[in-house]
Amino acid sequence: MSSYTVDIWSYSDQAFASDNLIGYEVEAVDGGIGKIDEASNDVGASFVVVDTGPWIFGKKVVLPAGVISRVDAVDEKVFVNRTKEQIKNSPEYDADTYRDEAYRSELGAYYGAGGAGWQV
């Protein structure tokens, strides 16, 4: 795994990893996208699964922990530094394969440096 892939799978602030983020609303830079359905705190492999509800027809998306810019524990909101369009165009979630290395590599390449979902 290249370094950008590892970085994208780590929380930018380790305090986020200690919070139970399930149920928190998720805000992209341009608006809400849904609620966290699942959260992983695995070292170098952390992510959240977001249930987008009606926004993209009830689909789920996986966001690597590195895209989380801020957590507001009082209002139970997670802020990500990606646009709704970038999130919508990410590799498709599949309940059977979203934990597989091949999917994680594809997602890491999409959100990581140089990928279509990259944003500083």
Image (cartoon, rainbow, N blue to C red):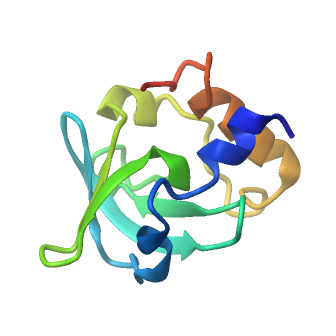
**Quadrant holding the C terminus:** top left
Q: Can you say whether 10 is above or below 3 in the image?
A: below
Where does residue 17 sit, x and y in percent of width and height?
50, 73
The mark tally for this picture is: 0
Q: Quadrant of the N terminus?
A: top right
Residue 69 or 101: which is nearer the viewer?
69
Q: Which residue is found at the position 76% from the left and 63% from the top?
A: 96
Work out whether 48 lies above or below 119: below
Residue located farthest toward the left when viewing the structure as drawn: 75
Q: Quadrant of residue 41?
A: bottom right
User: Seen in the image, is 56 located left or right of residue 39?
Assistant: left
In which quarter of the view is residue 16 placed?
bottom left
| Position of 37 relative to 53 (above/below) | below
Residue 82 visible in the shown view: yes
Q: Residue at x 60, y 56 (%)?
A: 10
Residue closest to the eye, 13 or 75:
13
Q: Residue at x 86, y 44 (%)?
A: 102
